Structure formats: structure tokens, C-alpha cells
Image (tube, rainbow, N blue to C red):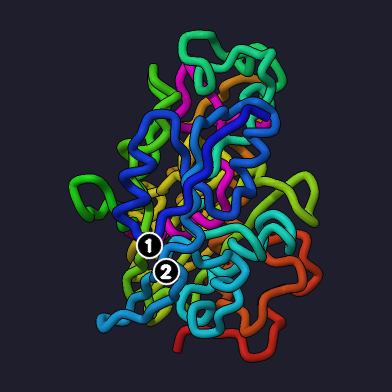
Amino acid sequence: MKTFDYVRPATISEAIAAAAVPGSAYLAAGTNLLDLMKGGITRPDRLVDVTRLPGLDRIERLPDGGVRIGALVRNADLANDANFARSYPAVAEALLSGASAQLRNAATVGGNLLQRTRCGYFYDPASACNKRAPGSGCDARDGENRLHAVLGWSESCIATHPSDFCVPLVALDAVVEIEGRSGRREIALEDLHRLPGSTPELETRLAPGDLIAAVRLPAEAAFAGHARYLKLRERTSYAFAVVSAAAALDIEGGRIRQARMALGGVAPKPWRARAAEEVLADSAPDETAFRRAAEAALADARPSGDNAFKIELAKRIVARTLTLAAAGTPERLPALPASPFSSIPVTSIPGAHHDA
């Protein structure tokens, strides 16, 4: 590992000033960053430790009914916060499906948003990767690419974004609070991550020194009774998604008033499926509507390699997630959160939430 300077600022303003220096990187739990440093993928000159900054480790209820989640809140603490899980069950389910329990105990909300792709070619310094070394090429294009993107990819990069947490956040219109050299600003999480285009090394809209301070979710009580996250992975105990989906429905009088839908594992960023939401609006929550929504969600999908199967797989995951959401949010999560192989069918869980 390359030697580096270590800085532990006492205030947010000190942290921003330190991280704005070229070659600097923020350090929180380091569950992704330290792996990248050990492998020589990321080689910062300076680490700016933000773990002692005040006020970033709180879960706060807002006057409008929404919630503000500090960037240093641990994934496990957020997922197991009873009030949060009741209001945003799909987000809690996504968090509990990510990584292992040990990692969830350490990993932070802000770090989850900014984790890097798990593309094997990105992690291999001997391989060409435009994300790691701009202009070097993309060995994934003609390599092992069955798990790569089918939406939003370019000839320069076909990697996928790995986060589970971000998928329901994007579906539920989460907003990111950012502290920077010019003060505080906000950006929709849907807009935080960039598509690769010809510059895949530019992954987010953050400027040098920008620090994610919090994530804010609006009041979404109308969706809490019909919200699920479903994740298909090659190893159910802990692995990144081959395909995942978050669905939240507002059902009244046997019709879907509003729908929220996003996909994971299919694109270089968490993918909001707005076309599917439009199809679902004012529809009956039935198999026909869910199949139409799945087709709409993947209408622009195209293989980036040996991964055409992911398109059909994603359609099935969308339809199944919608079916689970329509059946009602379970009172208790299954033993395998977000898994399609859970042994507990949601419709048989006593006390499951259903529309009146």
C-alpha cells in the first residue's frame, strides 16, 4: 500500500478544506476504500478521517414527517431503527440484504452512496479500465461480462453500480445534502451519479472537497403498507445483486394511485423506472399491469456483452417485486431479507399491512 498522510479534522469546514487538496480522499468506515487502497486501485496521498465530525451520526424526524439520516449513521443502526423501518420498509429491507452483518455494523450511509463498482476489470490493475485509467480501454467489453449493465452503459464502460441501499432511496425521491467550499447544497439522489458516456472516471456530481452530510427522505406514509425490495444474487448469504428492484405502491379502492419503482444491478447508477410508474398509475394491482410495467422498465435495455439474459431476468424481478408489494408489507421481514428464495411467503405473514 502506498504511504499517505492522515488528517483528522475537528469540524466540517476543516474537513472540506483538507479534502479539497488534490490527491485527498475522505475516510469513514473504509469498507470499500481500504480494499481499493490495498489492491493499488486507489492511491490517495491523504486520508481525511471524518468519523469524529459532530452531528453526522443522527437519525432525525423532520416536522413534515420525513427523515434526515446523517452520513455517518451505520447501515445496521438505520435498518434496525424501528421507527425508520416502519416508515420506509423497502429501504430497511435493502440495507439488511447488503453485504454481511459485520460490514453492515461498520459501513456508513454516506459511504454506501459513494461505493465503487465491483467490476473485476476495475479491480485488476493489469486490465484496461477507463474508469480507473481514462483512455486505456474497457477489457470488460470483450471479457467476462455476464453481470454487467444492460441500461445506461456506453462503449467506454459497462460496469454496474453496486449499492442496494440506493435503489429504494432513488425510488422514494431521496435528497442528498452536500457541504462544499461554496456552502451547503442539495441534489436529488437520482442525479448524484453520472452515466459513463465518454468520461466514466467521473462517477458523481461531487466537486473536490464536497462532503455528503446527510440523506433526506420525504414523508412517504402512503407507500409504507405496500413496499418491498427484491434482490437476486449468486450467493444469498452475502453478494452483490445480479438484478434487484424496489417497488412502493399507494393502493386505494383496488387501484394503484401512485407507484415508485427503481432497479439495481442493471446500470452504472441506481435506475429509476419512471416509465413503469406511469404504466402502473390508475391500474389494478394485478399480473397484467405488472407485466406491462416490467416491459416498460426494460424497454431501452440492450446487452453489453454476454448478458442478454439479464433483461428478461430483470423483467421477472420487477413483476415479482410488484406482486410482493401489492400483497402488503410484512409485519416482520423474512429470515432472508429481499431474497426471492425466502421460505416465508409474504401473503401468509400474520399482521401484514394491506389497504383498506
Q: In terms of image quadrants, where is residue 320?
A: bottom right
Circle 1: residue type: Ala
Q: Residue at x 72, y 21 (%)?
A: 144
- For mark 1, give the secondary structure: strand
Magenta segment, which residues?
146-175
Residue 273 visible? The answer is yes
Q: In terms of image quadrants, where is residue 319?
A: bottom right
Image height of 150 relative to 279, above or below? above
Circle 2: residue type: Ile
Kindly identify which numbered label has been placed on residue 69.
Answer: 2
Magenta stretch, main secondary structure, is loop
What's the CA distance linking mark 1 and mark 2?
A: 5 Å
Image height of 161 relative to 143, above or below? below
Q: Residue at x 33, y 66 (%)?
A: 282
Kindly identify which numbered label has been placed on residue 214.
Answer: 1
Where residue 67 sits: x, y (%)? Answer: 37, 74
